Amino acid sequence: MLRSISKILLTGFITLLPVVLTVYLLYWLAVTSENMMLTVLHWVVSDEIYFPGLGMIAGLVIVFIVGLLMKAIIVRQVFSFGEKILYRVPLIKTVYRSIRDLFEFFSPKKEGFGKVVSVSINGMLMIGFVTQDDTSRLPDFAKQSDNVLVYIPMSYMIGGFTLLIPRKDIHPCDMGMDEAMRFVLTAGITGKNN
């Protein structure tokens, strides 16, 4: 009977935890954006006009406007100039570039970038993500025309490997990037179409 109760509790915990964490993350994002915009809004908007949630709406509007502005060539050039300055500041360049590269990885802008592939290594198949298809951008030791740079994540987000793999050993996978990442991070427990 105790085993049955613990199994039911575990099932309930496993069922509720992803929902609770997702709701909490969304709540945290909303509250953080509201608090960040609150000070700015008090300068622009009177207390009579302000209502809870206005900061979050203002934050979304600002993100949208920045997205629109980034379509203009001059804005992209100014932004690129600012990034070059950031890339020269010792501590900031490491943190900023890492965060920027991570978000760039999930951006749909680059052809073949982030493409899900299966990699054949010593008879084993692993799921990976193409990070560099063009070897001309790689360091000199890696500029072999037949290689592709592939990131192989480890399950449960404990790390991963970035490997130069011969093009003949990688094959396209019929999975979207988010589906493949979920599959890998949960060690395949979720299955392909969950």
Image (cartoon, rainbow, N blue to C red):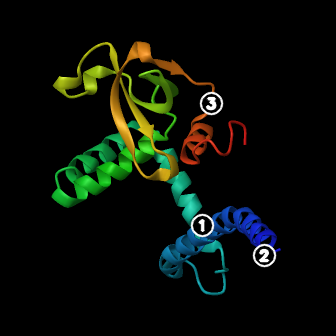
* C-alpha span from label 2 to label 1: 34 Å
- Classed neighbour count for the residue bearing mark 3: other residues with Cα under 10 Å, few (<14), some (14–19), many (≥20): some
Which residue sits at x=58%, y=24%? 173
* C-alpha span from label 3 to label 1: 26 Å
Which residue sits at x=55%, y=41%? 184
Q: In this view, does 127 lie above or below 1?
A: above
Q: Earlier in the sequence, mark 3 or mark 1?
A: 1
Q: What element does badge 3 sit on?
A: loop
* Residue with the mark numbered 1: 25
* Residue with the mark numbered 3: 175
Foreground disc of the pair 2, 1: 2
Q: Is residue 115 visible?
A: no
Number of callouts: 3
Q: Which amino acid does label 1 sit on?
A: Leu
Which residue sits at x=33%, y=47%? 79
Q: Position of residue 41 (x, y in %)?
A: 53, 77
* Residue with the mark numbered 2: 2
Q: Quadrant of the N terminus?
A: bottom right
Q: Is residue 38 above or below residue 112?
A: below
Residue 122 placement: quadrant: top left
- Classed neighbour count for the residue bearing mark 1: other residues with Cα under 10 Å, few (<14), some (14–19), many (≥20): few
Q: What element does badge 1 sit on?
A: helix
Q: Is residue 126 visible?
A: yes
Q: In this view, does 113 lie above or below 159?
A: above
